[in-house]
Image (spheres, rainbow, N blue to C red):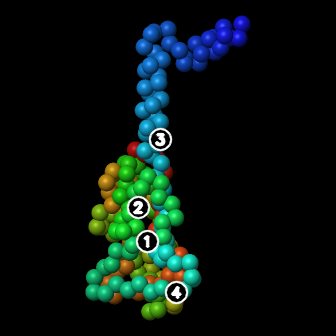
C-alpha cells in the first residue's frame, strides 16, 4: 500500500514520467541548475589593514592614483577577490552590490574611487577633519571577468585602525 501511494505521489508531482527518458532528463536539469547555483555564490569582504593591534596606519598616494590592496580577507566566497592586487574579478555575469568605506587621513581628507575596468564608478569623499569616515555603495551589472578596485587618488592620504576601511560586495543574482 505504501509503495503504491509513493508511486502515485511521484506521478502526480511529475517526478517520474511515463516516457522512459523523463527521469534522466530531470536529473540532468537538476545537476545543471545546481551547478548554476554553486557558481552563483559570490561574496567578498576585505579590510585594508591586517593588524589586530589597533594602531593607526597611514597610506599615501604619491603622484599617481594608488590601487589599495585590502589585505585582511574576511570573506571570499567564489574566490573573486585577490588581496595581492586589490582587485575583485567577477566570476559570473550578474547584478552585484559593491560598497567601500573609509576614514580620512592626517591631512583631514578622504578622496578615493571605486573603478570598474579602469573607469571610476563612484567615489567616497570626506573633508571634515582627521578620523572622519565616509562610505558609498552601488548595484552594478558585471560581466564575467570584469575587474573592480578601489584607488586612492593622487596626493591623498588615508588612515586605518582596527579595519575601518573595507571593500565588500556580493552577487544579488546571476544574469
Res 83 quadrant in image = bottom left
**Element under disc 4:** loop
Q: Secondary structure at mark 3?
A: helix
Asked if residue 26 is positioned above or below residue 84 in the image, the reply reads: above
Q: Tags 3 and 1 in contact by the CB under 8 Å rule? A: no
Spatial distance from mark 4 to mark 1, Cα to Cα?
15 Å
Earlier along the polypeptide chain: callout 4 or callout 1? 4
- Residue drawn at x 29%, y 63% as measured from the top left: 117
- Mark 2 vs mark 4, CA separation in Å: 25 Å
Residue reaching furthest right?
1
Q: Are marks 4 and 3 in contact (CB under 8 Å)?
A: no
Where does the image place residue 104, in percent across and percent down from the top left? Answer: 48, 85
Whole-angstrom CA distance, mark 1 to mark 2, is 9 Å
- The disc at residue 83 is none
Residue at point 54%, 86% (across, down): 55
Residue 139, quarter of the rendered image: bottom left
Q: Mark 4 near mark 1, Cβ–Cβ under 8 Å?
A: no
Counting residues from the start of the chain, the first of labels 2 and 4 encountered is 4
Q: Residue at x 47, y 41 (%)?
A: 37
Q: CA distance from mark 3 to mark 1?
A: 27 Å
Tell me which label, 4 or 3, sits earlier in the chain.
3
Percent across and percent down for residue 165 are 49, 75
Badge 4 local density, few (<14 within 10 Å), some, or many (20+)?
some
* Residue closer to the observer: 104 or 37: 37
Q: Secondary structure at mark 1?
A: loop
Circle 1 residue: 70
Cα separation between marks 4 and 3:
41 Å
> According to the image, label 2 marks what residue?
81
Residue matched to label 4: 56
Amino acid at each position: 500500500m505504501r509503495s503504491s501511494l509513493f508511486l502515485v505521489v511521484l506521478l502526480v508531482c511529475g517526478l517520474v514520467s511515463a516516457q522512459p527518458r523523463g527521469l534522466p532528463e530531470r536529473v540532468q536539469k537538476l545537476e545543471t541548475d545546481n551547478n548554476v547555483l554553486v557558481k552563483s555564490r559570490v561574496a567578498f569582504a576585505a579590510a585594508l589593514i591586517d593588524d589586530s593591534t589597533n594602531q593607526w596606519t597611514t597610506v599615501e598616494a604619491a603622484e599617481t592614483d594608488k590601487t589599495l590592496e585590502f589585505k585582511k580577507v574576511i570573506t571570499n566566497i567564489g574566490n573573486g577577490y585577490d588581496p595581492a592586487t586589490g582587485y575583485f574579478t567577477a566570476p559570473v555575469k550578474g547584478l552585484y552590490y559593491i560598497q567601500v568605506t573609509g576614514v580620512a587621513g592626517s591631512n583631514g581628507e578622504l578622496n578615493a574611487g571605486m573603478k570598474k575596468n579602469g573607469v571610476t564608478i563612484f567615489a567616497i569623499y570626506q573633508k571634515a577633519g582627521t578620523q572622519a569616515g565616509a562610505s558609498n555603495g552601488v548595484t552594478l551589472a558585471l560581466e564575467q571577468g570584469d575587474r573592480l578596485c578601489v584607488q586612492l587618488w593622487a596626493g591623498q592620504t588615508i588612515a586605518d585602525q582596527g579595519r575601518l576601511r573595507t571593500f565588500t560586495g556580493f552577487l544579488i543574482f546571476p544574469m
